[in-house]
Amino acid sequence: MPTPSETPEFNERYSRQTRFAPFGAQGQHNLEHTHVLVMGAGALGSHIAEQLVRMGIGKLTIVDMDIVELTNLHRQALYDETDVTEMRPKVYALADKLKVINSNVEVDPIYEEITSTNIETMIQDINPDILLDGMDHFAIRFLFNEVCHKLNLPWIYGAAVGGKGSVYAIDYTGPCLRCFMEETPETAESCAINGVIPPVIMQVVSYQIAELMRYVSGKGFSGKLITVSPFEVKQQSMDVSRFKNPNCTVCAQGNYEYLGKRQSNVIEGSCGDTFVFRFKPDHFDNADLFPGQILKANPYVKLLNVDGYEATLFKDGRMNVHHIEDENTAETLYRTLLKAVK
């Protein structure tokens, strides 16, 4: 029986990209035998996933812990208003639509939070060839940098916020992310605060996919830090080899500050005026004990009005509470909710 890459349908389907000589039939063959792990199913992750499935990636694993919300639709691929109404987890909504686009691609959705304590085992179990960053906050990229170095896994960093974006593909022959930046920015921008425009998402994803194409076709990563600002009609790329730090704590010394660090905070500030509360998983089944009411529910998430605040309770015990003015208010509310379910 012929493999998919030997069939006339396959050859016709991908003919426009295989005719691009630097990629060619061999690049397509390699792509068909590549397993990509996409971390995040938001703006970057959903567009990455769609493009790779259309191109004929061999296997795609997508990890995300969130549901589709109305504010996602202006920039995130494939989701629709039905997904919002049904509060569908992004990974399941995305996987269903990707399978319709290309039934030859194996798509594996994983509805789970990525943490410093589960990421190493998660990646070892998934066993990908490469990781693509589709996340929307900076600190977790330090975690990617550490775990990928430890597991000798290449990865492609991508970030987009406001009207600016950046891409850098890392295989640890050149500088790693920690070589560029020793600490996580304390005032890192976020989409909820600074907004984000769709063109910057498209450009960042395009360069991430281009770096992946270089990698699978044998050309190797470009070794460039790429920055884009489509609203200003600007972009630049910079050779970053000179930034390799011979004393880097990660790629030179193998010291991992983030990897394996246990989550100690039960309250975390998130984007804008949203706080994340952490309860036990069994509190999901006992959500009626929280003060307020359950407005809507499915097997994965419950929408609540708790003490006058809009909240989303996830199956693993995470609760996103919206429109909280400050940390003191968040702490008071958390204690009130915790007391109610004890």
Image (cartoon, helix red, strand yellow):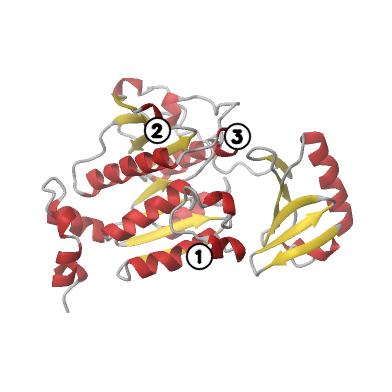
Residue at image mark 3: 193
Q: Could you say which is closer to the camera, residue 311 or residue 216?
A: 311
What residue is shown at x 54% (from left), y 41% (from top)? 259
Q: Amino acid at mark 1?
A: Tyr
Instruction: Specify the farthest residue to the top.
Output: 242
- Distance between the alpha carbons at the discs numbered 1 and 2: 28 Å
**Residue drawn 88% across the image and 56% down it:** 340
Residue 299 relative to residue 214: left or right: right
Instruction: Please tell me how crowded label 3 is: few (under 14), some (14-19), or many (20+) other residues with Cα within 10 Å.
Output: few
Side of 9 relative to 53 (left or right): left
Res 152 → quadrant: top left
Which of the numbered marks, if any, corresponds to residue 166?
2
The numbered mark at residue 281 is none
Closer to the eye: label 1 or 3: 3
Tell me if residue 249 comes above or below residue 317 in the rendering.
above
Q: Amino acid at mark 3?
A: Ile
Q: Disc number at residue 92?
A: 1
Task: Tell which of 1 and 159 is nearer to you.
Answer: 159
